[in-house]
Amino acid sequence: MSDPLKTFMQANALTSPAFAPDSRYHGLDTAHWTGPDGESVTYVRRRFIPPPEHFATLQHHTVAVGDRVDNLAARYLGDAEQYWRLCDGNGAMRPDELTTTLGRRIRITLPAGIPGGTDV
């Protein structure tokens, strides 16, 4: 017996997303490049990150000795792999930027475009 949802999607030329809803790449298109040798490479198109002011602040965290961005993501967001959301909400290009300076205040934010938080 086949999956009815999959059958419907195939019949209507609908494709499932390439990335899970909690992925930083969710909603991005993929593209293909063919090299001189004929090998095809699939890649993800560029991701544009909204400016930090587009993220609503839920709370702040002050960086202490031993803090790591993945542990902070696990603590505040419930998933260590969501560390990229902390980077996006704080305008950090590299994850380690967030925790190298002791005493730095890191914003814990909602995803971009979701209203709420303490800075409404």
Image (cartoon, grey):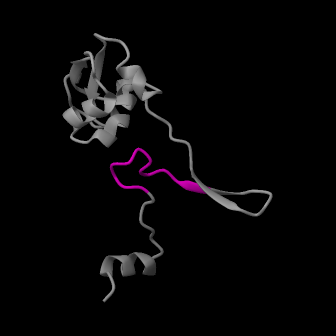
Toward the top, the furthest residue is 103
Q: Is residue 112 visible?
A: no
Q: Residue at x 31, y 27 (%)?
A: 68
The image quarter in which residue 35 lies: bottom right
- In the picture, which quadrant includes the N terminus? bottom left
Image mark count: 0
Q: Is residue 93 visible?
A: yes
The image quarter in which residue 81 lies: top left
Q: Residue at x 34, y 53 (%)?
A: 21
**Residue 70 horizontal/vertical position (percent):** 31, 34
**Residue 18 horizontal/vertical position (percent):** 45, 59
Check if residue 24 falls in the magenta segment: yes
> Is the residue 12 above or below the residue 90 in the image?
below
Toward the bottom, the furthest residue is 1
**Residue 37 horizontal/vertical position (percent):** 79, 61
> Is the residue 116 above or below the residue 29 in the image?
above
Toward the front, the furthest residue is 66
**Residue 7 horizontal/vertical position (percent):** 38, 81
- In the picture, which quadrant includes the C terminus? top left
Q: Describe residue 46's horizontal placement relative to residue 66 as left or right.
A: right
Q: Residue at x 41, y 24 (%)?
A: 96
Q: Describe residue 53's horizontal placement relative to residue 14 as left or right.
A: left
Check if residue 29 falls in the magenta segment: yes
Q: Residue at x 76, y 64 (%)?
A: 38
Q: Describe residue 39's horizontal placement relative to residue 3 as left or right.
A: right
Closer to us: 45 or 70: 70
Majority SS type along the magenta span: loop
> Is the residue 27 above or below the residue 80 in the image?
below
Where are the magenta residues, as a range? 19-31
